[in-house]
Image (spheres, grey):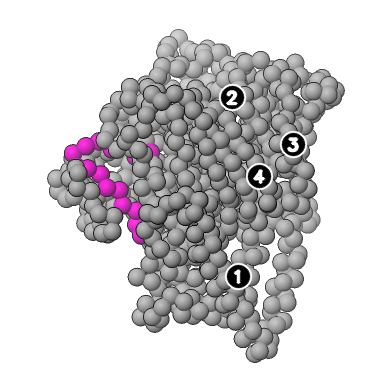
Amino acid sequence: MGVHTDKSPSFSEGKDMELQERDSERDGGFEGEQEERLLAGGDLEATGDVTYKVEWHLRTGWAVAGSLLTAVLVFCALSFFTRFFIVSKHHEQSGDETLKVSGMGGFRRPASDYVLDKAWNLDAASQVREYNWTIVDIVANPDGVFRPMISINGQFPGPLIECNEGDTLVIEVDNQSVNATSLHFHGIFQNGTNFMDGTSGITQCPIAPKRKFRYEFTVTGQSGTYYYHGHQAAQASDGLYGPVVVHSRDEKKLQQISYATDRVVMLQDHYHDLSSGLLVSALEPGSESSPIPDGALINGLNQRDCSALPHRMCDNSTAALPTFDLAANANHRLRFINVGAFAWFQVSVDEHQFAITEVDGTDTVPAYESSLMISPAQRYSMILNTNQTTADSFWLRARMVTHCWKESQLPGGGANEVKAIIQYTSSGHARSSTTIAPQPTSTNTNPEFAVQCKDMDTTRYVPVSHEPAPAVADHSYYLRSNLEIGDWRLERGFFNQSTFRPNLQLPTLHRTVEGLRKRNESFTSMSDSDGVNAVAYDLKNDFVIQHTGVKVVDLIIQNFDEGNHPMHLHGHKFWVLGQGHGMFPGYESIGLRAEGQGVLEDNQGGLDNLTRRDVATAEGFGWLALRFVADNPGVWAFHCHMAWHSEAGLVMQFLSRVDEVATWEIPEANLQLCDAGLEELEKGAAPPDSTWYGFGIGG
Ligand SMILES: [Cu+2]
C-alpha cells in the first residue's frame, strides 16, 4: 500500500522520485535539511550560510545533477545504515527473533511489548530491574512519512519499564545521538534521589553526545501509570519516550474492577519535522501560536495516505492502525498516557461506556464515562467491558481537540483523529498476528464533541486509598502564568515576572548544594526562611520558592492566556483544590478559609476525597488551585507540560527541605556530566534569546 504504487514498482524508485520532487521544490535535499535540524540549537547563522551556498550551486545544471546524485546516495546510505546496522544491532542485543516487520519497518516495537504480562508476580521480593539503553538517531516512518527521530536501541516508541513498588530501577544510558539528552521519569517521586530526576539545567547537566549516565532509584510510596521522556528542550516529541508501570502489592484491591488484560495506550501528537526546528518557529517573534501537529499516533502507529503528501518522503507499507485484541465478555484495563507535546485528546470507544479507575497513579473508585479528555502528560486508566453483541470490532477514537489551537487546520490534509481497532476475540482464539484485523463499521456514539481543553471533573474520581489533604496551608502563593510576545524578541513564558532559562553547565541543584555546603552567604542568609529566594537565584530567569522543614503549600495559578496550561510538579502529587474559568474567586468559593487556613463550617470533610495527581490544567483565562506537601528534599520543576510553552520559559522551581539538602553532596557521576563543555551540553537545547537581536527580554 505504498505511495505511488501505480507509478513506481519498487520502493527505491519511489524514493528517488520523492527526492527529485523535493529537490525541485526546495533548496537542498532531505539529508541536508535533516542534518541542519539535527544540529539545530547550534549555529543558526551557519545554517543560513549553507542555504545560500546551495542556492548558488543550483544555478548550474551539472551542480543540480551532482546535488541530486549526492542526496540520493547519502539517503540510500542512511537507509542502509538504519536498516542493517541499527536494526540488526538491536536484534543482536535482545536476541529477539520474533520481530515480524522487516526492512524499513524494523524500527517498530512489537505491539505486544505494551501488553502487560498476565503472569507478573506482585508478591516477588524487591529487586533491581536493569535496562541498557543506547540513544540513537534513526530515520523512521511511524505513519508512513520518513523523519529523523531519537530512539532507544533503534526502536520506537521506547520500551516499557515495569516494576513492583519497592523495586530499584537501573537505566544505563549511552547517548549516541548527536544531541545531548536527559531522561525524566514523569511522576516518580525520587525521594532522596533528586539528582536522578533527569531535568536538564535543574537537577543535572545534560548527557552530552558520546557520554554515558546511569539512572538508579528506588520506587517507593507510589504505584500506577507513569512514563519517561527526554527532558532536553522538546526532544520527547522526536520519539524519546516510553511507559512506566509500577505495580502496587495491593493492586488487586486498589483496582476495584478485576480485569482480564492490562495494557498501555500512548497517545501522541505527531510532527513530521524535528522538534528543534519546530521550536525555533514556535518561539519566533510576534507569534503566540504553537506548531500544529501533522497527525497523531497511538503506541507509535497510524497510517497516512502517502499520495496526499507529495512533498514528503513516504511509504506506508509497514504503517498500520493499532489493533487491540480483547477477549469478549471480559474487563480490560487500558492505561492511557498522553505522551504528546501539545495536543489534548478526547478518547471514546464506539458503542461502549467505560470506567475510569486511575488518575495519574492514584487508584480511584470506578466512575463511568463515555468520553475521556486527557492533556499532555496526564494518565487515566479505563476499564472496558467487551459486552457488546452488535459487532465484534469497534473503533477506539482519539481526537485531538483542535478548537483549543489558534489555527485548527492540520497541515497537509492531516486528520485530527487517530483510530485503533478494538477487536473482540473469543477466549483462547486470538487473532493470528499475521492476519490484518478487518476495519470496524461502528459509528461514533459519543454525543459530546469537546471544544474546550479542560480537565475531567476529578471530583467525580474518589481515591480508593484515603489520603485527605491537610486542612491548613503553611503558605499560599499566587502565581500569574502567561506567554509574552513582541517584535524582535522570542516568545517567552512567564510565572509572575520570571521566565526560566536552564543553566546547563551549573544546574540549580548543583548551585544549591554547593552554596549551602560552602556556607556561601547568599544561600545561608536565606536558609531558615520560606518563600521566594531572590538572593541566591536571579529571579529574572530562576524563580525558586524554597521551604525548610516539611510545609503544606498552596499554589493559585491565574492564567492570563487564552490557551490552557497543563501544569506538572516534579517529585510530588498534589490535591486539586479547585479549577475554573475567569479570575480565582477566592478561597471561600472552594470551601476554605482565607489563605487556605482550614475548611469552612459548611464544608467539613471537603478535603477528604480530593484526587491526587501530578498534572492539572489552568484553562484559558482560568485558574487552578493546588495543595501539596513539600516534604521531598531537592529542587523540583513546576512547569507547563506543553513542550512549546515550557521551552518558552514557563517553568519555575520549588526547593524543598533546605535543611536536608544542606547535608547533601552531588554524586561524582553527575558532576562529571558537567565537564563536557558548554557547546556539547547545549546540543539540542532550546534557542537562546540572542537568536533574535533587538529589545530582547529576559536574556
Ligand atoms: Cu502551556
In the picture of the structure, the residue carrying the numbered disc 2 is 191
How far apart, in angstroms, are the residues tagged by discs 3 and 4? 13 Å
Q: Residue at x 72, y 81 (%)?
A: 56
Give the amino acid at mark 1: Glu
How far apart, in angstroms, are the residues tagged by discs 3 and 2? 20 Å
- Foreground: 405 or 411? 411
Q: Residue at x 47, y 45 (%)?
A: 159
Name the element at disc 4. Answer: strand
Q: Earlier in the sequence, mark 2 or mark 4?
A: 2
How far apart, in angstroms, are the residues tagged by discs 1 and 3? 36 Å
Picture layout, residue 602 above or below residue 231: above
Q: Which residues are magenta?
A: 320-335
Give the amino acid at mark 4: Lys
Residue 667: quadrant of the picture: top right
Q: Residue at x 22, y 42 (%)?
A: 327
In the picture of the structure, the residue carrying the numbered disc 1 is 31
Give the amino acid at mark 2: Asn
* Mark carried by residue 671: 3
Is label 1 or label 3 in front? 3
